[in-house]
Amino acid sequence: MRGIGRRGDVLHCDRLPLPEAAERYGTPLYVYSRSALEDGYARYAGAFASVPHRVCYALKANGSAAILRVLAGLGAGADIVSGMELRAAARAGFPPDRIVFSGVGKTEAEVSLGLEHGIAAFNAESEEEIQGLSALAVASGRRARVALRVNPDIDPRSHPYISTGVRRSKFGVDIARAVEVLERARRLPGLEVVGVQCHIGSQITDLAPLEQAARDLASLSRSLLDAGFPLETVDIGGGLGVDYDGAGAPGPEALAARVLPALQGLPLFLLLEPGRSLVASCGVLLTRVLYVKETQGKRFVIVDAGMNDLLRPALYDAVHRIEPVVGPLDATRSADVVGPVCETGDFLARDRPLPEVRTRDLLAVRDAGAYGFCMASNYNMRPRPAEVLVEGDAMRLIRRRESFEDLIAEEL
């Protein structure tokens, strides 16, 4: 078995029984499967093998160094959104010509860092940003490779907080203005216009919006090529959803079947920027039951992981499957799985059918490899969890649990 699944009544990560990880490193604990990560990348590479392409992993989903080193070693590129992510990508072994820099608010220091490294492209999100790129490139004696991020006003039909391709969002340039914006851009010194990019959102399970975005991007690319722009790339972003609730979600193969026909005949190198769909199912958050209590007929399962460890349920009302690590999965009655943080909004699940559990039982929050640890905080002065990478039947600590000394280290 590769990845996270059950053997009998015990949940495993690859060949490792997960109780062993919790016993050795404590809880809350993030555990990742290297084999699941490798399989996820292989699926993308196979699905798009018919065209020249690069899978640029979106570091914002999970920036842990061990995860990054695995993906860099597989040949992935990196999609970054900050200067620190650029430094992390370089440290992990991503070559500069495989790094694209996204984000609506790049600072001068971050742009200068990208120019110094010689990255593949800046995904520019406004005309003012393009002008700033030109000025900094000229001042540094370097050239900035620029791809324009366009906003096609397509609703991805996911959560409004992660819908980035609609007109009301802060991201990208109105696609109707793209040609005029790039006509002015190509007259600026220090710039090379190398491509166009679009990312309409995250956790997308209906492929129709992604197909339409690819069609719009292909039409724009053809117009620009006809106008003499020496484009090199077309970047369709990421956003493919994950099967968090067991209802099913399309994979990279289904995505390729929908978007590749829309891009057919374009003489451009295809870039993709998946994050969640590469790492979510590779990870699990282990948490220990502290208490079980009843209040006017409502059952609360109080665990040692909270919104500071996994923010998605509190922030998005996101659903993660939760199950006992040991024992049958037959649900008996509903419960709220809540954490120790002093907030009513501190929950991992609400009104969720669960088996009977007792104090000290170990629970697993599934599909926690994306937007888990990277969004963790020290709220209530709680240390962030440790992280473990499982390779076959062996595991290694890739980030230790924070201590009190870590929490106060930057105080003066």
Image (cartoon, rainbow, N blue to C red):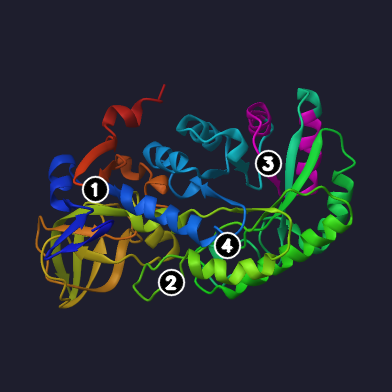
Residues drawn in magenta: 109-137
- Give percent across and percent down for residue 356: 11, 70
In which image quadrant can residue 399 be found? top left
State the separation of the CA atoms marked 3 and 1.
38 Å
Q: Nearer the viewer, residue 46 or 195?
A: 46
Residue type at mark 3: give it: Ala
State the separation of the CA atoms marked 3 and 2.
31 Å
- Give percent across and percent down for residue 309: 33, 49
- Look at the magenta stretch and give its main secondary structure: helix
Residue type at mark 1: give it: Pro
Residue indicated by mark 2:
249
Residue indicated by mark 4:
201
State the separation of the CA atoms marked 4 and 1.
30 Å
Residue at 58% across, 34% down:
83
Sequence-earlier tag: 4 or 3: 3
Residue at 66% across, 36% down:
107
Residue type at mark 2: give it: Ala
Residue indicated by mark 1:
28
In which image quadrant can residue 81 be found? top right
Residue at 54% across, 67% down:
255
Give the numbered dot on residue 121. Answer: 3
Circles 2 and 4, Cβ within 8 Å, touching? The answer is: no
- Could you tell me which quadrant the C terminus lies in? top left
